[in-house]
Amino acid sequence: MASEAKVSVRRYHLYINGEWVGSSSGRFIPVMDPSTEEIIAEVPDANEKDVNRAVAAAKAAFDSGAWHETTAQERGRILFRLAERVRKEAGMLAELEARNSGKPIVEAEYDINDVATCFEYYGGLATKVLGHVNPVPDNALSLSLREPIGVAAQIIPWNYPLLMAAWKLAPAIAAGCTCILKPAEQTPLTALEFANWLPEAGLPPGVVNIITGYGESAGAPLVLHPDVNKIAFTGSATVGKIIVKAAADTVKRVTLELGGKSPNIFFADADFESAIDGALFGVFINQGEVCSAGSRILVEKPIYTKFVEAMAAKAKTIRLGPPLERETKMGPLVSKDQYDRVRSYQEVGKKEAKLAAGGGRAASMPKGYYVEPTIFYDVDNSARIAQEEIFGPVAAVIPFANEAEAIRIANDTPYGLAAAVWSRDIFKTFRVVKAIRAGIVWVNHMQPTYVEAPWGGYKQSGFGRELGPSGIEEYLETKQVHINLNEQPIGWY
Ligand code: NAI
Ligand code: MG
């Protein structure tokens, strides 16, 4: 094969039925380091045939064999072993994640720690899935049993690669499902490294399969496959809508996390220094490639001018640099496509609003997909940069006059993933918390995310909840069992 010549480029395989196998097409997808624009690896370009193999393996593992006999206790232990291995290899995983996604190494280290915590949490939860006794009015015993949903297809994005894999795999394994995970084509490497540890952790072949490939050729056939019972998707709203339609023909269970345009709301009585920090952190962490990014910054008029100035001054000090340098606070965007998309929104913003900071490519970085942290102000909420998800370090600052106007603007979006409210007035704050139509509302902070608490959106940000006890619910069916205790005929006829 021609690409065999590129010796420094690591070549990966698909993980199907406990084995590393090539794709049926024999083609590969190049995987980049977005800070150097160099190819660092190749992964198989899987297609429908490969998907069929993976689904067959997942279905066979679900229907019979070792997984069928694996107890909840043992599934819990498997998850704890995986967590332990992730902690042991955290340095390698964080470095690979940072290199491949562009995120700063320090952030990647937090992510990998969260990956391990996620496996631990669902390891513990595996033995806490409870059924019910239903109080039916008869001489009978009525039970609700909880059973795994079956074969789950899990399609994930590139912004938190291994963490998104963990959010999906851990509850599915805890519930007793089998999985086909499709990482994003841009960032498949950490999930593939992770797969190496599945057998030694005690997972029988076929329980977790990993298919690398593009959305249209590897993701779409997974969504259509009749033997897939559930789709869990995180990604763009555009693809989320395609998935719901495609899943309808086989009535698959679907959960979607589709990002948003989350409002970060600052009242004049908020602590000013914390507010500026919170506004910047809310929108610039992970280069702004965050589904819950606080990309609409709503500021009460008395502090508005001072707020924009302080934000802009501090944004200009954010250290852009190579992902592997510990001082780096912002790395490159994940890909050329994402760079082009964010650059185009920077230009749209210049026509729609006023520019306080950034606005272009980061001139200090000779190579790589770096853009400047960018702040637009005097943004009208109907502007494209206030309505459309940009998924990059681009903030839209919007002034508001009072509480009612803040609520109106905050909710004037098709999305509803997250929001934050900053104030010292608990009456006002809690009124706003209640009025916001979003799945996550932070008060005097933005972005802290815990495996113990549910994650997901209202409106077009999707449906279903990951993390916490709700995370495992999404992988369970309910079976009602009625046990007649009368030993006589029904006597109807
Ligand atoms: P995308 O939604 O196309 O990709 C996410 C995942 O879906 C990837 O694994 C991809 O291969 C897969 N996919 C794509 N088309 C598919 C199809 N027809 N059937 C099944 N799977 C499919 O996201 P993309 O194009 O990488 O980014 C575009 C925009 O999406 C971003 O600018 C951002 O606004 C948004 N996004 C939101 C994310 C979130 O966390 N909610 C994550 C990534 C992107
Ligand atoms: Mg796409």
Image (tube, grey):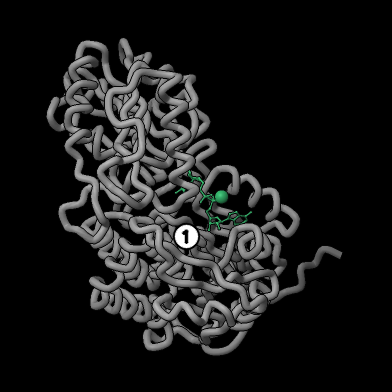
Could you say which quadrant of the image residue 381 lies in? top left
Could you say which quadrant of the image residue 471 lies in? bottom left
Residue at 35%, 16% (x, y): give it: 378
Quadrant of image for the N terminus:
bottom right
Of residues 487 and 329, the one nearer the viewer is: 329
Residue at 24%, 51% (x, y): give it: 321
Secondary element at tag 1: loop
**Res 205 visible:** yes
> Which residue position holds label 1?
186
Of residues 431 and 390, the one nearer the viewer is: 390
Of residues 11 and 469, the one nearer the viewer is: 11
Of residues 160 and 136, the one nearer the viewer is: 160
Residue at 63%, 82% (x, y): give it: 60
Q: Position of residue 340 (x, y in %)?
A: 47, 42
Could you say which quadrant of the image residue 443 lies in? top left
Q: Label 1: few (<14), some or many (≥20) within 10 Å?
A: many
Q: Please, is residue 264 above or below residue 332 in the view? A: above
Residue at 61%, 71% (x, y): give it: 46
**Res 432 visible:** no
Quadrant of image for the C terminus:
bottom right
